[in-house]
Image (cartoon, rainbow, N blue to C red):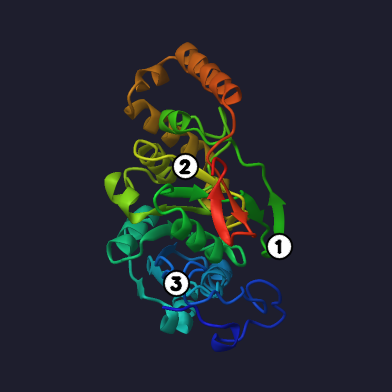
Amino acid sequence: MRCPALADLPPPPPHRTGWPWTAESATVPCSTPGGLAWPRLTVVTPSYNQADFLEATIRSVLLQGYPNLEYIVIDGGSNDGSRAIIEKYRPWLAHAVSQPDDGQYAAINAGFRVSSGAVMTWLNSDDMCAINSFWAVGGIFGDLRDTVDWITGIPAMWDRDGNLGLILPRPKLDRLLLRWGAYDGVTLNFVQQEGTFWSRQLWEAAGGCLDTSFAFAADYELWCRLAEHSDLYGASALLAGFRRHPRQKTARAMGAYMHEMAVCRASRPGGETERYWLARGIKRRLARALYHARRERNLIFYDPSASRWITASS
């Protein structure tokens, strides 16, 4: 499906202006500058009682001007007005349900099972994509299809009202350290889930599902598995952001998130170090030493003179 134009969508609620209410992304041409079709992009939004933010999330996906979008919303049977919002935008959704499920990660798995996109991501129902981000994502996977299977954008946060409140430094991305689980917010900065995209080929190679034994850290566990198969590349583009507000899961349960990350590391090769505080400390020091010793690589930039995306080593 081609993304709808702003004029095609229902009008925004009163007093809502700017992105994604009264602004829209530039319209992406039907084919790439090289004359190829844009890769189909699948976005899954899991939702449960997030009516305060869900409409902005949906509009931030639909108003991308992208010519080959598959957008899926899986709602867990909300009772706060979310269903009415989903129905409002159903004509532009490839698939949508609202019924009880087994939680966020089961909902994402369900969405991906009925999807067909060559490039995949999920966007939680209180987060937003950045304007013009799918042009960058489609261009990267189109131009670098033989090199890149997995990207993450510049980390960013929205405030409760949808203002871009903070852009964060992206950590250097190292495949070995990803496999170790070193990007845990303590040893090294997190890899932000919002704005991370991967190929279907990589998704299937890594098992083709999120581990639903985790209630909070299935994204972190997925990064460890994806890194077994491919390098993660950092895109020089703002793709999506995390919305900070008091009711979000991570704000209420960061301790549980940290515990689940430790469980994930303990289950991986070499995970016996998680049992002993001294061994954990040594491994953290080693990970940081490796991180600082290695040069930054796996970066992607847009070359306007060539109208294409290139890697730092190109």
Q: Is residue 30 left or right of residue 214?
A: right
Mark closer to the chain start, 2 or 3: 3
Disc nearest the viewer among 2 and 3: 2
Q: Which residue is rendered at x = 53% and y = 65% of the image? A: 134
Q: In which quarter of the image is residue 263?
A: top left
Percent coordinates x, y for residue 103 in the rendering: 36, 56
Q: Is residue 267 left or right of residue 167?
A: left
Classify mark 1: residues with Cα within 10 Å, few (<14), some (14-19) or many (20+): few
Amino acid type assigned to the residue bearing label 2 in the image: Leu
C-alpha span from label 2 to label 1: 28 Å
Would you name the residue on which mark 1 appears? 163
Mark closer to the chain start, 2 or 1: 1
C-alpha span from label 2 to label 3: 38 Å
Amino acid type assigned to the residue bearing label 1 in the image: Asn
**Residue 208 seen in render:** no
Disc nearest the viewer among 3 and 1: 1
Percent coordinates x, y for residue 197 in the rendering: 46, 54
Which disc number belongs to residue 79? 3
Percent coordinates x, y for residue 96 in the rendering: 36, 74
